[in-house]
Image (spheres, rainbow, N blue to C red):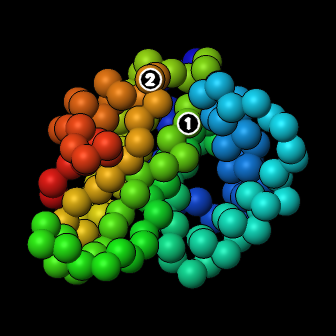
């Protein structure tokens, strides 16, 4: 794998949907979910609509012209609570780096970009469910376990 400095980061484009779909499939399989049905078309629909309407912001890492990492923030609304009077939720998801490119800080940089994005959109916290592999990255960024989620106050 090339060095961390040779990686370009940018927001995902509509043309990135095919590799986003394949990376999502790899992520799910690596996390132990059996591939019992083909969800590729459903993923194409999801990425197409959510990137377009802004309910998902996705960043990618690119090396050698190929997407080698991705991470996203989903935005949704819940009824207001005392701890979240707006009810607005930013949810970090779809974090994946191809195996040959791991352990050089790509995921941490993607998390930083997503947290900056959430702050710019006036979200006051970010939630996620961490895989075993990703837990350390989130802890290094300041996430803590709370109410069944890992969360980070911004």
Residue 35 visible in the picture? yes
Where 121 falls versus 46 (above or below)?
Answer: below
Residue at point 29%, 56% (across, down): 126
Q: CA distance from mark 1 to mark 2?
A: 13 Å
Residue at point 13%, 67% (across, down): 83
Left or right side of 93 for 81 = left
Query: Dot 1: what SS?
Result: strand
Residue 101 in which image quadrant: top right
Answer few, some or many: residues within 10 Å of disc 2's Cα (few below 14, many 20 plus, some between 14 and 19): few
Answer few, some or many: residues within 10 Å of disc 1's Cα (few below 14, many 20 plus, some between 14 and 19): many
Where 74 falls versus 102 (above or below)?
Answer: below
- Quadrant of the image containing the N terminus: top right
Residue 22 in which image quadrant: top right
Residue at point 58%, 60% (across, down): 12
Where 116 falls versus 88 (above or below)?
Answer: above
Where residue 122 sits in the image (x, y, percent)?
A: 22, 74
- Tell me the mark number nearer the camera, choosing from 1 and 2: 2
**Front residue of 67 and 23:** 23
**Front residue of 151 and 65:** 151
Where residue 110 sits in the image (x, y, percent)?
A: 41, 44
Provide the residue designation for mark 2. Answer: 132
Residue 98 visible in the picture? no
Provide the residue designation for mark 1. Answer: 96
């Amino acid at each position: 794998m090339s060095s961390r400095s040779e990686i370009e980061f940018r927001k995902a484009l509509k043309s990135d949907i095919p590799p986003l779909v394949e990376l999502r499939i790899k992520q799910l399989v690596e996390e132990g979910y059996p591939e019992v049905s083909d969800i590729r078309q459903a993923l194409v629909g999801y990425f197409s609509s959510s990137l377009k309407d802004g309910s998902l912001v996705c960043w990618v890492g690119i090396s050698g012209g190929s997407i080698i990492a991705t991470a996203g923030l989903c935005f949704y609304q819940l009824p207001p609570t005392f701890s979240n009077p707006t009810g607005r939720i930013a949810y970090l998801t779809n974090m994946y780096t191809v195996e040959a490119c791991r352990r050089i800080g790509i995921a941490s940089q993607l998390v930083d970009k997503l947290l900056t994005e959430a702050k710019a959109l006036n979200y006051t916290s970010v939630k996620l469910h961490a895989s075993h592999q990703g837990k350390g990255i989130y802890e290094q960024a300041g996430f803590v376990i709370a109410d069944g989620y890992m969360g980070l106050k911004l």
